[in-house]
Image: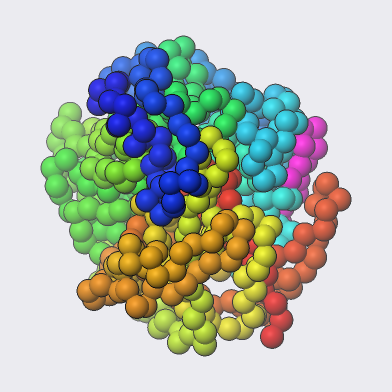
Amino acid sequence: MSSHLSRRGFLAAGLSLAAGAVVQTPDHARTPLPTAPPEGGLTFPSPELTSYVDEMPVPPVLTGDRTLAVAASSHRFHRDLGTAPTWSYGGQEYLGPTLEAHTGQPIALTFDHSLGAHLFAADVDPSLDGASEEDRTKPRLSVHLHGAVTRPEMDGHPEDTFLPGSSMAYRHENGQQATNLWYHDHAMGITRLNVVAGLAGMYFLRDEYDTGTADNTLGLPSGEFEVPLILADRRFHDDGSLNFRTVRYVPQGHWEGGMIGDRMTVNGMVSPYFRVARGRYRCRVLNASNVRGYHLSFTNRMSFWVVANDGGLLDTAVRTTAVRVTPGERIDLVVDFSGLDAGETVELTNDQEEAVSVRAATGAEVLRDLVRFVGTGASGDTGSLPARLRGGARQPAALPAVQAPTRTRVVSLTQSPAQTWPPVSMGLNNLCYGQDPMVTPKQGTTELWEVVNSSLEDHPIHLHLVNMRILNRQTFDVASYLRAYPRPEQGTFWAPSADRFLVGQPQAPAVWEAGPKDTIRCPQNMVTRFVVRFPTADELGFDPDAVFRAPSGMDLQGYVWHCHIIDHEDQCMMARYRLVSA
């Protein structure tokens, strides 16, 4: 992409940042922007780097109760980059170890916060909800186990934070089926910065069927043939350090809509390679990127099997040649490298483009080079998958049917003009965090959520505590919808139904989206429908509406739901919700 834009192109880029709410707002609501591209080009480009020259690291696996340091570290992201200052969990160079637990067996995790000044101190925006100048020197932390069924005080609530020199103890009951969870920072207003700095890791939950060992009853590769793949785009300074800034026209220290990297990392290494034996591997994929979604396939177009997603195993393995994964989603792939001779290679690649608005605003290009698999010629796992993964002998129960909802709840994904830089603000139901009305589903009820996305980009929606089941997605006439229902100023609840403006037939979810999910892609210009059951206190074994006290002395209650583009959740696209007793 050219580093220079025309005056018109630059204006379009700035105004469409974070999905370009300009098309939805009158002229007088727009905030003036520069009339020429900034000196030096639109973005801060990383150094040119050769792909597939560094071996992919595999995080160590830790089990049982333990204390993990949250500390400054250092890491070299590529052989041609210098060593960079980073943050990490558990003494790693970057990111955290893979934590492993067993269904029904509680685990106690204590996180010791020994960080000093923020790695991205100059990028803290104290105007965001929850953020302050103090975050530059004393960054807050909160550790959320994404996808877990947890007591409210153990959830890693964004306002339940702790400061340098202190610790936070979490106890996870693990009262759910085997699945691939992940843990990451969730401190309000600075989540996007803390995660890029390195605060994320995987959490494998096992059971008597999916044991992670060779005696598992599902025919899944295990041991050295089970490999985590943490996908995250990043941007680097010439000295090899992480650069959080994407575009030059947003002054440093201001929220800029989304950190878009121009280099791909897998497990913290830029486009690495990984040696594989002849046989099957279970690739446990996590999209830990801030903004980017990925459409994954292999360069030789070979097929593979999807065996699980966010909520755990599918009923049957799905054979395909490509899958899509948005920020926060996980997906388990079984890939057979039996045909790869010693020295032969095949790459896992991506061909997903970002939304037009995002490309215009950030210059985002497709990142194709993910990871190269290099054959060793050694013998590997030559087993096979059963016809079913659920519902058979020595298998978990088949997935239940989707429950019939007792109410329909329409929610909207909105973007509004703002007196900020960039001049746009995110919102759920046209509200920012803390604004009422709050979503208050009743315990023991089942709701159909219709997510109306009138913005110009996709948003992955994540609800804490619960899982959802996707019904379908359907296009609607956005222009007619917005003319019929003019959006009020942000801060006024606004979530009109799009039923009058639906176009065409509902689209069934992809086969690999079957079963429970905790994060759901809600595409632009579509209504995404999913069913969610809100459990009772008796079913959970704890009161999900209990009041608890944060280290700050603040009394908190409930959980949150938000967009998992973490730059968006830091800027109003996160809301509270409570599970009230019937």
Pick the residue in front: 287 or 421.
421
> Picture coordinates of residue 90 (x, y %)?
63, 35
What residue lies at 77% left-to-right and 59% top-to-bottom? 556
Quadrant of the image containing the C terminus:
bottom right
Which residue extends farthest front?
28
Which residue extends farthest right?
553
Residue 189 belongs to the span the image colors magenta: no
> Picture coordinates of residue 136 (x, y %)?
69, 27
Query: In the visual, does 74 lie left or right of 514?
Result: right
* Image height of 297 relative to 247, above or below: below
* Image height of 511 relative to 74, above or below: below
What residue lies at 16% left-to-right and 40% top-to-bottom? 299
What residue lies at 45% left-to-right and 87% top-to-bottom? 404
Instruction: Give the image's coloring scheme.
Output: rainbow
Query: In the visual, does 74 lie left or right of 435?
Result: left
Q: Is residue 210 visible?
A: no
> Picture coordinates of residue 98 (x, y %)?
53, 44
> Picture coordinates of residue 578 (x, y %)?
67, 70
Quadrant of the image containing the N terminus:
top left
Query: In the visual, does 521 lie left or right of 569?
Result: left
What residue lies at 43% left-to-right and 27% top-to-bottom? 34
Residue 544: which quarter of the image? Answer: bottom right
Residue 6: which quarter of the image? Answer: top left
Pick the residue in front: 111 or 35.
35
Magenta part of the protein: which range? 161-172
Count of numbered labels shown in the rendering: 0
Residue 169 belongs to the span the image colors magenta: yes
Q: Is residue 339 visible?
A: yes
* Image height of 64 relative to 120, above or below: below
Pick the residue in front: 109 or 381.
109
Query: In the visual, does 224 lie left or right of 504?
Result: right
